Structures are given as C-alpha cells and as structure tokens.
Amino acid sequence: MVPTSGLIASIENKQIIFMNEKELWKYFWDRKICHSRPLDRDFIWITKEDFRPVRRYFVSEFNFFHYKKESLRSQGLLFHIHVIEQGDYLFVHKDTGNVARFFPLGLIHLICDVVPYFVFAKIKRVEMKSIFVRPE
C-alpha cells in the first residue's frame, strides 16, 4: 500500500517511501543537535548520518554565499528546506523562493531570506556569516 499523505514507512530501517516538506522539517527537528532562532526563524544543525535517508528529496545547487560548501534544496517551489554543509554537520533552515527549481524566484528569495539577514547583521554589527554558525 502506497501512502498518500507523505507518511514515513520505516524510519527504524532508514527506508523512507515519501515525505512532504512538513514531514521533512519534523524529521530534521527530531534529530537536531542544536538550534538557534535569529529573526524569529528556526535554524537547526543535524549530522550527515541523519541526512542520508532523506538525501533523495534534495537537489544540489550552486549557492553564491556558500560556494565552497555543498548546498541542497528540497523540491518545494515557493517554500522549501535549504541544507548547507558545515564541516561534520549540516545547517538546515526553511527558505522562500526555490532558485534551484525556478531561477526567477531568486528575487523573492532575495527579498524574504537574504536582505533581512544583511540588515540584521548591520544592526547587530556582526559579520553576516556569524549568524549561521552552529552554537556551541
């Protein structure tokens, strides 16, 4: 029987049939090793091992701000999950405007996800990249 609502088939055996964006986020949230919340948005970090079972739901993309690291986005067109490699861990957050699926959505992404953090960094007088560093 094929699940119709994006149910997890057998997480113990790491065999996943289908997961939607909401279930992917819950999967990551349940496995987070740490969490921060700048600008009222959840940032979480997970292990690479925990990411392997759901890797197939993500596509690699070139990311101007994280060009030296692996950057992946889930399949959601407007709302999606963005995963960025950070050493032994993966930085996970929700994004708007999936440029990996439709490049013109980059404008929405810029307005909703990039500019607010530039402004936040300027107000706090910190480097932009420090906002996305895993808390100890």
Image: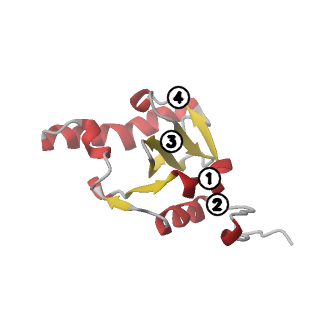
Q: Is residue 104 left or right of residue 44?
A: right
Residue mark closest to the camera, 3 vs 1: 1
CB-based contact (under 8 Å), mark 2 and mark 4: no
Q: Quadrant of the C terminus?
A: bottom left
Residue type, numbered disc 4:
Phe
Q: In the rendering, which numbered label is found on residue 20?
A: 2
Residue mark closest to the camera, 2 vs 4: 4
- Using the image, determine if residue 83 lies above or below residue 44: above
Q: Residue furthest right?
A: 1
Q: How many marks?
A: 4
Residue mark closest to the camera, 1 vs 2: 1
Residue marked by disc 3: 97
Q: CA distance from mark 3 to mark 4?
A: 15 Å
Q: Residue at 37% of width from left, 58% of height from top?
A: 42
- Which numbered disc flags the more N-terminal residue, 2 or 4? 2
Q: Quadrant of the N terminus?
A: bottom right
Q: Specify few, some or many for label 3: CA neighbours under 10 Å numbering under 14, 14-19, or 20 or more.
A: many
Q: Is residue 127 left or right of residue 77?
A: left
- Which numbered disc flags the more N-terminal residue, 3 or 4? 4
Residue mark closest to the camera, 3 vs 4: 4
SS type, badge 1? helix
User: In the image shown, does 95 or 84 lie closer to the viewer?
Assistant: 84
CB-based contact (under 8 Å), mark 3 and mark 4: no
Residue 121 falls in image quadrant: top left
Q: CA distance from mark 2 to mark 4?
A: 23 Å
Q: CA distance from mark 3 to mark 1?
A: 24 Å
User: In the image shown, does 107 or 7 lie closer to the viewer?
Assistant: 7
Q: In the rendering, which numbered label is found on residue 62?
A: 4
SS type, badge 2? loop
Residue type, numbered disc 1:
Arg
Image spot of residue 24 (x, y percent) = 58, 60
Residue type, numbered disc 3:
Gly
